[in-house]
Amino acid sequence: MMRKTPDRNVMMINSGHTILQRYLQQLIPMAARGLLRMKNSHLHNMNCFWLIRFSAEIALRPVSSRHFCLKIESADAESCQENGILVNNLACMGVDVKMARRRQPGVLKKLITNEEGLKKFLQSKGATNEIIASIISRYPRAITRSHESLEKRWELWRSILMTDLEIVNILGRSPESFFRSSNNMNMEKNITFFCSLGLTSKHLSNMLTRAPRAFSNRVELNKQMTDLLHEICLSLGGENPNGFVKHIISKNVFILLRSSKQVSANIEFLQSSFHLRNEELLALLHGTGADILDLSNEYIKKNFTNAKEKLLSLGCTEREVDRFFIRYPRVLFLSAKTLSDKIDCLLQAKIHIKQIAETSRVLDVSISTVRSRVKELEKTSYDFKTYGIGILTLSKKRFEAKLEKLHSAW
């Protein structure tokens, strides 16, 4: 009797079943041993099975369950599932996986990462497990940096900072500043550029501590800002533009994180709103005016309007208001409510608004401190009208010494 020849498609399907099942059988033990994150060549082999002419639904029908999920990096990465082994590793390290997923979800889908290497590297620099977990939770991309990249970047930071602990502390506050870029050559160029401006190691250390992202900027971007400051100094009649640039950056490094357009707008606003001549504006920028150049222009305008209205409503003249802002441009940091509450607190202590305008530093003192000091001074019959309000701005140690003398005299 003639044997019936099997259908060609059926043979192909059976063959596909056999090959795919064998492949999965090989992979399951690998997953159990934590080797799921395989090289792209394995993934390529896996993709080749789908070239066989049968549907994925039919091919996978014999497999009753899937013990793990393969992640294939492609244009549809967002639809792929997370790397379960990686997620488990991070959880065991104490990482807040939910936070990591919310901040950089793509990292949890990667097949090749360096979380264990990162942990050992940071531990060798003095970081605790808690700090390491916090760093990864807030900036998951840190686990994608190679050991070589980490070593080089650490070496660059150590060329500025004195100890490993200083770097660890910065990473604890702002992990993005260290891990945001792996372009170590760019950072090296920035260090060279900042030194060419006359900034010392002490300046660079302060910059790296306060605004480390400035070192991750493109050198061209930082140069745009310094060129702008150079031009501003010359346009205002300054004779030492290089010294002006050095002063502004050392005084307020945060302007390197802002756009040239924003800084220009703030300088124009200061000149027009405070009614300053060029030499007066230059003097202001050489002083405390540099502190506010990185603020949002809209924020400055809003706070200026609120402060001016408050002072005028209390009897100050336009000229007194201008002098107040020139003396204390930092008032533009204060919201309308904060400024109003502080002024009202001082007025309740029977301090005149003109005294506040003349001794504007008193607005740096917290409301609770003002109240407690006013209460102590009342016991000595201290007269603010006669002796002024400068006593409220003293340091704690100096105030207590002054208070002791007042008690003795009284």
Image (cartoon, helix red, strand yellow):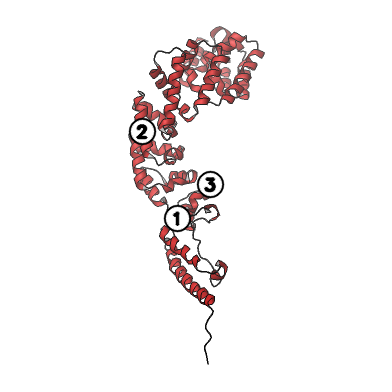
Indicate left or right for 42 with 382 as reference: left
Above or below, 174 against 375 in this view is below
Q: Which residue is mark 3?
A: 99
Comparing marks 1 and 3, which lies closer to the viewer? 1
- Give the residue at mark 1: 111
Q: Is residue 328 left or right of residue 217?
A: right
The residue lying toward the viewer, choosing from 365 and 325, is 325
Give how far across and how far down residue 342 sits, in percent. 60, 20
Residue 82, position as x, y percentages in the image: 51, 55
Determine whether label 2 and label 3 are within 8 Å by CB. Answer: no
Q: Is residue 192 left or right of residue 10?
A: left
Q: Residue furthest top?
A: 386
Please, what is the three-letter code of the amino acid marked with disc 1?
Leu
* Label 1 SS: loop
Counting residues from the start of the chain, the first of labels 1 and 3 encountered is 3
Residue type at mark 2? Answer: Lys
The label shown at residue 189 is: 2
Answer with mark 1 or mark 2, whichever residue precedes in sequence. 1
The residue positioned 56% from the left and 68% from the top of the image is 55
**CA–CA distance between discs 1 and 2?**
33 Å
Q: As rendered, which of 94 and 399 lies closer to the eye?
A: 94
Q: Are marks 1 and 2 in contact (CB under 8 Å)?
A: no
Name the residue rendered at 34%, 25% in the picture: 196
Going by the numbered disc 3, the residue's amino acid type is Met
